[in-house]
Image (cartoon, rainbow, N blue to C red):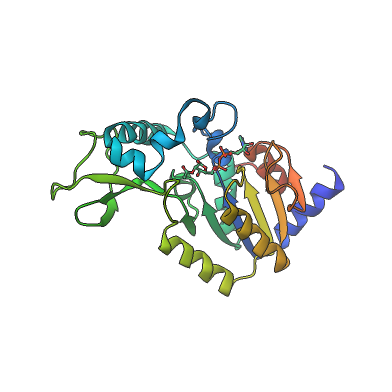
Amino acid sequence: MCSEIERLSETLKASHDVLVITGAGISAESGIPTFRGAGGYWRSYDAAKLATLQAFENDPKTVWEWYDYRRQMIAAAQPNQAHLLLASLEDRGKRVFIITQNVDDLHERARSRDVVHIHGSVWEVNCLAERRVYENRQTPLAEIPPHCQCGGLLRPNVVWFDEDLPAGALSAIEEYYRQRKPEVVLVIGTEATFDYIRSFVQRAKYAGALIVEINPAVTAITPTADYTLHQPATEAMRILTGEAV
Ligand code: OAD
């Protein structure tokens, strides 16, 4: 192991408070496609037709078919070593706060305890008649588009491109920065296309955190990162934690 990585690993080992920001890349090794890279959804699907409120209003069936397909894929997937090793940091007494852009539940299934879904969850639906959000894990869906017991049309409780971020998630993140001071930030498997993702990282960096990016590619975070491990998430997490699960 080169001395720089040894130092990173030691810093992580000695830290008490770790902020983790994840994107589609952390779930790629669980078999869930990313969005922008090779084989990514946006290479073969039009985001404007599947991931906007306008698309849903025009054609809820097509949008729900895509989410039903993704729900089935997520249900069949398992957390990988990167998810598991992140969760194991908590078993070692660290406080770990995860901000994920992923709509899957692989962090929770790996037993991470403090996870904020900034782009929502495929396992929640929102009744458009009652404006009520609740869990729905039926896979495959019996009816597309699905309806609430009240008769109202359901939508996936995810954030689309033409929508605001969920207030609850934003206030949980605000609360986190007010109360805690992460020593290390792990930014794993994201292109960091959105400015708010970059700002979460910048904010911790200004407060003195060491920024470690894990991504085989160069991204919008790479210039901000103190160090980038250009490896798949599972391999990089094994190197950083010095462990296998
Ligand atoms: P992207 O698909 O934009 O980026 C995935 C990143 O993961 C890329 O930088 C890859 O290099 C990296 N990657 C691929 N395999 C990896 C591996 N095994 N280990 C580590 N990294 C790997 O996904 P996000 O940045 O998450 O939003 O995209 C953000 C948002 O854009 C998504 O939440 C979604 C999308 O459009 C909405 O739908 C609103």
Which is nearer the eye, 200 or 179?
200
Q: Position of residue 113 (x, y in %)?
A: 48, 58
Q: Residue at x 74, y 52 (%)?
A: 225
Q: Is residue 175 left or right of residue 72?
A: right
In the orientation shown, which residue stands out farthest toward the bottom?
179
Q: Residue at x 40, y 42 (%)?
A: 52
In the orientation shown, which residue stands out farthest toward the right?
3
Asked if 169 appears above or below 225 in the picture, the reply is below
Asked if 65 appears above or below 157 in the picture, the reply is above
Q: Position of residue 115 (x, y in %)?
A: 48, 56
Q: Is residue 167 left or right of residue 97?
A: left
| Quadrant location, the C terminus | top right
How many marks overall? 0
Q: Position of residue 68 (x, y in %)?
A: 33, 34
Which is nearer the eye, 49 or 141?
49
Which is nearer the eye, 231 or 10?
231
Q: Quadrant of residue 15?
A: bottom right
| Quadrant location, the N terminus | top right
Query: Can residue 31 be seen here?
Result: no
Q: Position of residue 237 (x, y in %)?
A: 66, 44
Q: Is residue 182 left or right of residue 24?
A: right
Query: Can residue 50 be seen here?
Result: yes
Q: Residue at x 14, y 48 (%)?
A: 149
Q: Residue at x 22, y 39 (%)?
A: 146
Q: Where does ligand 1 appear, by image quarter?
A: top right
In the orientation shown, which residue stands out farthest toward the left?
150
Q: Is residue 193 left or right of residue 105?
A: right
